[in-house]
Amino acid sequence: MEQLYAILACIILGGLAVFQVALVAGAPIGRFAWGGNYRVLPQKLRVGSVVSIVLYGVFGYTALAKAGLVPVLISEGFTEVFMWVLTAYFTLGVAMNAISRSKPERFVMTPVALLLAVLFLLLSLG
């Protein structure tokens, strides 16, 4: 089951990466991200989206490494601890998205963060 959880997490993270690429490119979907204050993101937040894309790649690789689908890069112990850190990060993301002033962000991104939190929890426990 760990492999399935990792693959599902990577699919979601990939979708989020595509979403962030669209934000960087100036798509008018900013209401779904970064607090929902902008329809089109300003330059500063676009840089944040680029950083998010890179982080999603790291998160996905970590999930795949935990499931044994790719080689562990640093150590198994580090991967175990980092998985718990990511579980906490996505759990915090649930809360942050749930209190967003932006309705679109609340209703779309809260469930996405919850699903990632659950998947990373299941991987961490495995």
Image: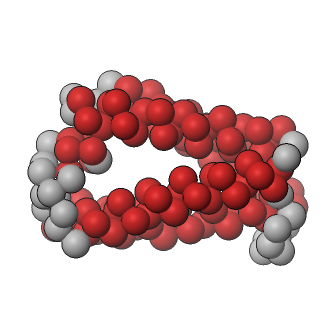
Q: Can residue 96 be seen in this view?
A: no
Q: Is residue 95 positioned above or below 113 on the image?
A: above
- Residue at (39% x, 39% y) in the render: 109
Front residue of this view, candidates 79 and 112: 112
Front residue of this view, candidates 27 and 24: 27
Question: What percent of the width, then of the height, locates residue 35?
Answer: 25, 40
- Residue at (81% x, 56% y) in the render: 3
Front residue of this view, candidates 57 and 29: 29
Q: Can residue 20 be seen in this view?
A: yes
- Residue at (38% x, 26% y) in the render: 98
- Residue at (85% x, 46% y) in the render: 1
Question: What percent of the width, then of the height, locates residue 116?
Answer: 59, 43
Question: What percent of the width, then of the height, locates residue 79?
Answer: 78, 58
How many numbered markers are drawn? Answer: 0
Question: What percent of the width, then of the height, locates residue 113?
Answer: 50, 39
Q: In which quarter of the image is the C terminus?
A: top right
Taking 40 as reference, is 69 left or right? right
Taking 60 as reference, is 18 left or right? left
Tell me the quarter of the picture where residue 100 sits.
top left
Judging from the image, the colouring scheme is secondary structure
Tell me the quarter of the picture where residue 84 sits.
top right
Taking 3 as reference, is 57 left or right? left
